[in-house]
Image (tube, helix red, strand yellow):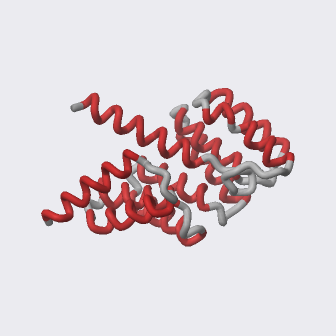
Amino acid sequence: MKLCAKYLLAGLLCLLTACAIQGPKGGTSPADDPLTRAYFTALEPMREQNWKKAERALLKFAEQHPKYAGPWVNLAIVYRQLGRNDAAAQAVTKALSLNPGNAAAWNQRGIMQREAGQLKEAEAAYRKALEINPEYPLAWLNMGILYDLYFQRHHEALTFYLRYEELMNGEVDRQAAGWIADLKRRVGRQ
């Protein structure tokens, strides 16, 4: 059973990391402009989970383009992967100082707060992300995780998970689909 939980956690980590990559201005797909192309090139090591190389590439980009929050959000993810939680918190703070309206930064803050056991603060951060961008799927997913695993409020968790699934526009997240099926069974028994 411990092995199964280990793989579940690893899968969740990959899901949260892969989906969270942000463009320099907050977008999530490369455009025709050179700045965005350069930024997505800097993200390549992150996609490959080469965390040290990703750190160097993102720091270089942030130094060259100091007004963008996106690199700092991604640096927070990189630092969490490297176990450098203080650096991750500083990166999120930097991102939010540059752009307080960055939903991905609020989502990352919520993840870090949840991991630190600051559950009410995590909920507030996820809600702030959703206030900024109600269409941001990862904030819905993380609210579902918070309500499912930590608050044990399964009906509400199911609502959050279903909204996440809806916002994925047909892209199947098998792990979340499994959680949804499990919650539907559990909620049906309550």
Q: Which quadrant holds the C terminus?
A: bottom left
Please report the residue visible at 79 percent of the width from the left and 48 percent of the height from the top. 36
In the displayed structure, does residue 188 sit left or right of residue 3? left
Q: x%, y% of residue 106?
A: 56, 59
Q: Which quadrant holds the N terminus?
A: top left
Q: Is residue 94 visible?
A: no
Q: In this rendering, is residue 166 above or below 32?
A: below
* Camera-side residue of 150 and 155: 155
Classify residue 165 by image quadrant: bottom left
In the displayed structure, does residue 36 sit left or right of residue 190? right
* Camera-side residue of 190 and 65: 190
**Residue furthest left in the image:** 189
In the displayed structure, does residue 100 sit left or right of residue 169? right
Please report the residue visible at 38 percent of the width from the left and 63 percent of the height from the top. 162
Q: x%, y% of residue 92?
A: 62, 51
Q: In this rendering, is residue 135 above or below 13?
A: below
Please report the residue visible at 80 percent of the width from the left and 54 percent of the height from the top. 67
Q: How many marks?
A: 0
Q: x%, y% of residue 140?
A: 45, 62
Classify residue 51 by image quadrant: top right
Q: Is residue 134 visible?
A: yes
**Residue furthest front in the image:** 170
Please report the residue visible at 61 percent of the width from the left and 27 percent of the height from the top. 50
**Residue furthest bottom in the image:** 131
